[in-house]
Amino acid sequence: MELFRPINSYYDFENIKMVPEGDLITRNLSDMDWMYQDQEAVQELLKEDPQIYRYYNVDIPEEEGHLQHCISIINPGKVGNEYNMTKGHFHEIKGTAEIYYTIQGEGMLFMQSVTDGEPEFEALEMKKGTLSYVPPYWAHRTINTGEEPLAFIGIYPGEAGHVYGEIEAKGFMKLLIEKDGEPTIIDNPNYK
Ligand SMILES: O=P(O)(O)OC[C@H]1O[C@](O)(CO)[C@@H](O)[C@@H]1O
Ligand SMILES: [Fe+2]
């Protein structure tokens, strides 16, 4: 058996990045433009196509026994009145969990369960120091409600994998919008 060697990664708070970068994945508005409600705002913003979020994946084998881990950064901002957010996903192996540890900024973690019947919804607050548990069988999306980048560490089983199809097609049951200056959870009128 070939041993995988221990490795360190660092979060550079000043430059808001992981060092070394590992596998850097960036998502701009054009990668998820249909996921926002206000399509007029989307069209306007697409002229610049801002980066919504990025994540730095440490290069770990996608195998049972390993722990995938990454640092994700969601830029502050809104599309219309909806806050910047990740696409959201289920794990390919749905019975795998994930831990998020917030290291900077503030936001919310939206979760939606996979069930035989009606899916259920949960939301947790994220702020510096929050350790959040995403149990098995919950899709997850993170949202930046603050003025600064929202940065968090994600740790999940090596074999978990990601599946986007269902969330891409159906969306989440709830949306997080700014209303009277406050983050407010509302029903998603377009949830299918
Ligand atoms: O996969 P999405 O929905 O684009 O969001 C990325 C998030 O999911 C993770 O892949 C972890 O599950 C993180 O790297 C990141 O925070
Ligand atoms: Fe995940």
Image (cartoon, rainbow, N blue to C red):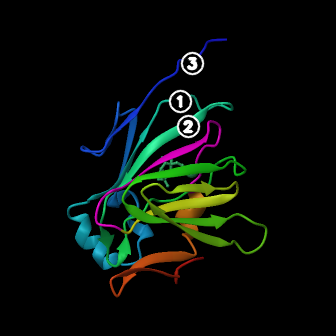
Marking on residue 85: none
Residue shown at 63% from the left, 72% from the top: 121
Left or right of 190 in this view: 49: left
Instruction: For the residues labelled 3 and 1, say whether their Cβ atoms are less than 8 Å apart.
Output: yes
Which residue is labeled 3 in the image?
A: 4
| 49 vs 23: above or below | below
Q: Position of residue 65 (x, y in %)?
A: 68, 30
Alpha carbon distance from label 2 to label 1: 6 Å
Task: Check mark 3 vs ligand 1: CB closer than 8 Å? yes or no.
Answer: no
Question: Of helix, strand and loop, which one carries label 1?
Answer: loop
The image quadrant that residue 15 belongs to is top left
Marking on residue 60: 1
Q: Which residues are magenta?
A: 146-164
Instruction: For the residues labelled 2 and 1, say whether their Cβ atoms are less than 8 Å apart.
Output: yes
Residue shown at 30% from the left, 63% from the top: 76
Amino acid type, callout 1:
Ile
Task: Check mark 2 vs ligand 1: CB closer than 8 Å? yes or no.
Answer: yes
Left or right of 58 in this view: 136: right
| 7 vs 175: above or below | above
Q: Position of residue 145 (x, y in %)?
A: 38, 69
Residue 151 on the magenta segment: yes
